[in-house]
Image (cartoon, helix red, strand yellow):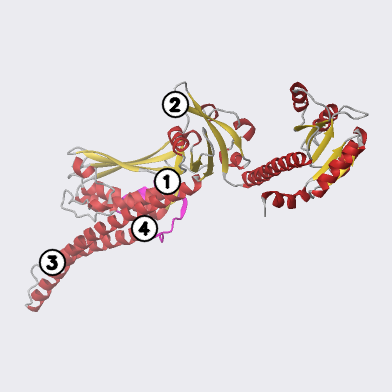
Amino acid sequence: MSFRMKFFEQNCNFKILVVDDTPALLFTTVKILKEAKFDVYSAKDGEECMKRLSEINPDIILLDVMLPDINGRDLSRLIKNNPEFSAVFVILISSHNIDSDKIAEGLEDGADGYISRPISNRELLARIVSYCRIISSDRKSKDLYVQFHALFSSMQEGVYLHEMVYDNNGKAIDYRVVDANEASEIQLNIKTDYAIGKLATVLYNTSEAPFLDVYDGVVNTGKPVTFEQYFEPMDKYFLISVYTPSKGKFVTTFTNITERKKGEMALLAKNEELHRVNSEKDKFFSIIAHDLKSPFNSIYGFSELIMDEAKKKNLDGVEEYASIILQSSKHAMELLKNLIEWAQSQTGRLVFNPEYLDMTLLMRNIGASFKNMALHKEVTINYSLSPRTILFADKAMISSVMRNLISNALKFSNLRGTIDVSIEKNGNEFVVKVSDKGIGIPSDILTKLFKIDDGCTRPGTSNEKGTGLGLILCKEFIEYHKGKIWVESKEHIGSTFYFTIPVLAD
């Protein structure tokens, strides 16, 4: 099948209105077009033309220039200026030889084509078919545009069409937003009306156009690129895809992925924290195993000695052996107690139960429990407390913190030393201070305090043993209260431990 015949089969899709006041010419033109399978209508003057135009809405009008009631060019102008019919293809027909200026005037007035008579039937038909091809192509372009615009508008991703801006040497220096979809407003929080026409440096208030090198590379190579990037001017992360539809232009589709990136970073931080905690626990349990071994060895060894001496009915030294067993048992029990409390805090099984506490009364009661230990070393414990200081805190946790700090102060105090305990309000927090004038803490040990993986423990001035867990528990418990704990110390001069508890808002 020839192209001509194939196209004729499609002619029925085109409606043609022939307007001519000469009956013979009107009849002949209509007959030719009908034989070519066009859907043909006729009118003999301008008035009838306008009436039929409204009725049938033709694709093409063959319009005689010389009509009895109106000039064809004027009628063409009226049709083209009417938004309802501006898309109709108007072809002016003249029965007289006409110069090029008149043809130009007709086309300038809005006509889409010009045919001069006399013209053969074959040429007339060929011209009409040619115009139909133009109309078909235009319709396809419009359909594609409608489909594209529907997709463009319905996309959840933001879309910007840009044109590159170059300097006199052809170097890309900026880019301008040419078009934007509605979703871009959601993704960027920038109105499309404001964005369109703006240079990137103006739109984002930056000295240089963001990602200019990437976009220029896409424009120059034609290779699309997709990347994730933090966009500092908006403090957001975006997934951006870039491609170039034509020379000097590029399209970006972008999605705000800030929440996803925050989730990924939080997960990464959690994984790193889990790895750190597991590593610390491994070291910690190694330390605990070593520290538990020593008191149990003492208990085991001296228990055997007592049994041997008992069999021999020799009680000399039994009291001393029993005392060593008792101290070793106490040390092991203290270590296990601290270990259980620490394990509960790490597994979330430690109950945080804050209440109103009279810290003056609490600290005096705790101090009384160290009376014998203080008398043994002739250490004086001084309290600088208000008559009634009320904290909102967990009694068990704060008691444990105070016991550990006062115990440490006694342990590392010299004979006949002094310990000062105080609490005062400082702004929106209470500051508790436990200070001694003992042996102080060497700088290399000072940096290891409160760290579970360093196993920092040393004997006291009377060779008292520690568990290595006390200060770690203090840190855990104070952090439960959203407070802070720290130490200031100088070797051979003494140490001062501080911790804070926030004041409960009214």
Q: Mark 3 touching mark 2, by CB under 8 A?
A: no
Q: Is residue 383 visible?
A: no
Foreground label between 1 and 4 = 4
Q: What secondary structure is marked by label 3?
A: helix
Which of the marked residues, 4 or 2, is nearer the chain's N terminus? 2
Q: Do callouts 1 and 3 mark residues in contact (Cβ within 8 Å)?
A: no
Residue at mark 1: 482
Where does the magenta region start and end? 344-369
SS for callout 2 = loop
Q: Nearer the viewer, mark 4 or mark 3?
A: 4
Residue 171: mark in rendering = 2
Q: Which mark is residue 321?
A: 3
Q: Where does the image place residue 7, in percent across and percent down from the top left?
A: 71, 49
Kind of residue at disc 2: Lys
Residue that numbered label 4 is attached to: 346
Query: Amino acid type of disc 1?
Result: Lys
Reading the chain from its start, which is encountered first: label 1 or label 4? Answer: 4
Q: Is residue 249 left or right of residue 126?
A: left
